[in-house]
Structure formats: structure tokens, C-alpha cells
Amino acid sequence: MRYWLMKSEPGEVSIDDALAAPNQTVAWTGVRNYQARNFMRDAMQPGDGVLFYHSSCAEPGIAGLAEVASTPYPDETQFDPASHYFDPKATRETPRWMLVDVRIRKKTRLLSLAELRTRPELADMVVLQKGSRLSITPVTAQEWQFICKKLLNK
């Protein structure tokens, strides 16, 4: 089992939007970074743990716990000319962008980026590194356990 931090802008999909979705599951559309896409395509498996992170908002941070709920499949937004995420180079025969479904397990208190930065146990966490802007990053088992047990009391 692996663990991930997945960023979503609350204006696109918030933790509350995901909780209101059928089966509390959303397709993780719109990823347009090759490294993040490769994490979904090559490394994620159903059941992997996810820290659902709100980004590009007044107070960014972890808003809930989730899990990967599907194997990867093509992101339909790449084929839609009306979509902000349209990619004219993508074809159905050779899609460029993949996604996974994410199922919410629990909305938590907001564990802010500022609070994460105060914890020496999390100093090496990818999301806390200078210049880290990826929307999907791996989380170590130790980081996951510390966040869940010590900070979120799961």
C-alpha cells in the first residue's frame, strides 16, 4: 500500500463536493503535469491512502482522508474542446492524460500548511519542500501514520 497527497482547488472540487458525490467518489480530472500523471498511471493502486489537500485557497491544507478507488483510465476532459483541460494532441487511441477515482473516507479538521510546517517529523514531506508545486506527491508510511495518529487522531 502506498500513500499520496492530492491537491484540489476547492473551487473545482472541495472535500464537501466529494462527500456529496455518488459513493463519495470523484474522478481526479485535470492533471496536466507528466510526473503527477505518471504517479496515477504507473504507481497508484485501488486502496492506496490519500491525503485530500485544498490548495490555491485562503488556508491551504489537508481537509480529509481518502483512498484511490480505481485503476487509471483516460481523463475525458482532454478530448473535450469546451474544457479548460482540452489537449488537441490527445486522441482516444493514444490518450496523454490519465486519472484515477478518489473516494472520501473522512472529512477532518483542516490541517493547515502552516501547521504541517511546524512539525519536525514532517520536515522531509514533499509538499513542504521549497519549489514543490506538484498536485500529486508521494507520502511516506511514517508521514501518513504521524498525520493520522498524532495530528488527526484517526
Image (tube, rainbow, N blue to C red):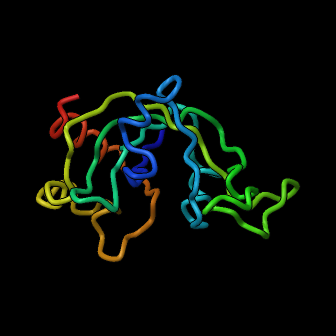
- Looking at the picture, does residue 151 appear above or below residue 79? above
Q: Position of residue 152 (x, y in %)?
A: 19, 36
Q: Locate residue 23 relative to residue 85 in the image: left or right.
A: left
**Residue at (31, 43) in percent of width and height:** 144
Q: Residue furthest bottom?
A: 131
The tally of labels here is 0
Q: Locate residue 100 relative to residue 92 in the image: left or right.
A: left
**Residue at (72, 66) in percent of width and height:** 87
**Residue at (69, 63) in percent of width and height:** 86
Along the line of sight, the residue nearer the viewer: 154 or 14? 14
Residue 44, image quadrant: top right
- Looking at the picture, does residue 10 appear above or below residue 46? below
Q: Residue furthest front?
A: 82
Residue 38, image quadrant: bottom right
**Residue at (30, 32) in percent of width and height:** 107
Residue 55, image quadrant: bottom left
Q: Locate residue 107 relative to residue 34 in the image: left or right.
A: left
